[in-house]
Image: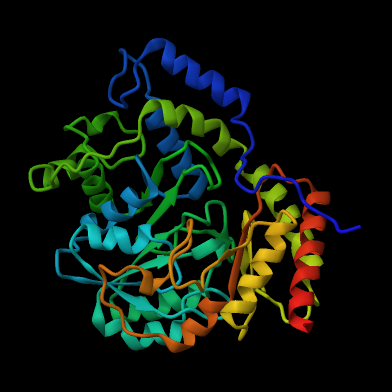
Amino acid sequence: MTEKFTGNFTQQEPIPDEAIEAALAVLRHGRLHRYNVSPGELAETALLEQEFAAQTGAKYCLAVSSGGYALATALRAIGVQPGDTVLTNAFTLAPVPGAIASIGAKPVFVGVTEALTIDLDDLESKLDQSDVLMLSHMRGHLCDMDRLMQICDAAGVAVIEDCAHTMGAAWRGQKSGRQGVIGCYSCQTYKHINSGEGGLLITDDEELAAKATVLSGSYMLYERHLAAPGPEVFERIKYTTPNVSGRMDNLRAAILRPQLRNLEQQIDRWNERYVEIEKGLRGTPGLTIVERPEAETYVGSSIQFLLLDWSPERIALVMQRCAARGVDLKWFGGAEPTGFTSRYDSWRYVESAPLPASDRILTGIMDMRVPLTFSLDDCRLIARIIRSEVGAVFQS
């Protein structure tokens, strides 16, 4: 009998009861705006910032409306101007080049390796084209952060980390987002903590933190933040930094705080599922596992594998056969963006030079969500289905 998976790849776990109760408390008192507090009250948003700063080891944290807004705010705070160039990954998702383009800057794309991380040799060859790198830890894969920071520091290139897929991950024990000058995170439904939409920005730089806070729309109420610099820092920048409103509200912060406290346990659960799928795929003819470096602590909320040097037609056949058995694979090699997938030549508002070595890898990237609604038995079944269908097409 042919096995079939009947689960849902987009169904998240329910919001925890503690988070629901916290949200109801906010709805009952009605003070949703982060600066709308009663005397002596600490806003949920300010508490979330304080807790996330402590969890990551950062001095300062700002909660905003989305991960993409956090990225654009980081660029503005660091001084990127219209017409400037910003280095970034060729393998990423649309909000990253979108953040760069949103302030009138121009992305310069850097290639991808078979480890699905930024090509550091290609980066080194392009460091003279910009003084800012927006580094995307795409799908949770961390590059050699020691080497990356060494070459960027030597060239005077500031690093903004897009940690949308690496909240809770680490490189040699240091939390993702702490190596660069700014780390940006997403709290969108498919990320590691879920408020539907939302973002977080961390930094140790007091002036960048103050600028980001004013940019988010603080209306000079920055003293109500618990993870921000002192008022003397705001005095230096408050009249020259525009308001580009994008605050997080207390309702979303209330939903996120209990999830943040439970993040490490959730990471363990994701990684259990990731390992089961990876084990089941190892040794499949024609399929390349993406190996994880020992220095990396990862969060396996999605899994990728490569069908290197396969024709697009054969990859499409694998996808069709897996879909017929209930397994939803995404593909980054398509000529047109589909769903959440796209590639550097999909963003036609940007001029991009061809990247033939990266195109070979992008054409072979297969991607799959691993929601916590899957059981370990589900993961083993999914791996068997992929293994069977990849093997069948490869050997045909």
Q: Quadrant of residue 80?
A: bottom left
Q: Nearer the viewer, residue 149 or 71?
A: 71
99 above or below 307? above
The answer to whether residue 192 is above or below residue 139 is above
All told, the count of numbered labels is: 0
- In this view, the residue farthest toward the right is 1
Residue lying at the far left of the rendered structure: 239
On the image, the x and y values in percent for residue 264 come to 64, 45
Residue at x-position 21% and y-position 56%? 76
In the picture shown, does residue 244 fall above or below 339?
Answer: above
Q: Can residue 119 be seen in this view?
A: yes
Q: In this view, does 308 lie to the left or right of 181?
A: right
Q: Return the x and y of residue 85 as percentages of the image width and height.
A: 22, 73
Give residue 305's quadrant in the image.
Answer: bottom right
Who's the residue at 31% across and 48% down the image? 69
Q: Which of 58 and 89 is in front in this view?
A: 89
Left/right placement of residue 74 relative to residue 280 reads: left
Q: Quadrant of residue 275?
A: bottom right
Position of residue 396 measured from the top left corner of the image (x, y, whole percent): 77, 82
Is residue 59 among what the camera can see? no
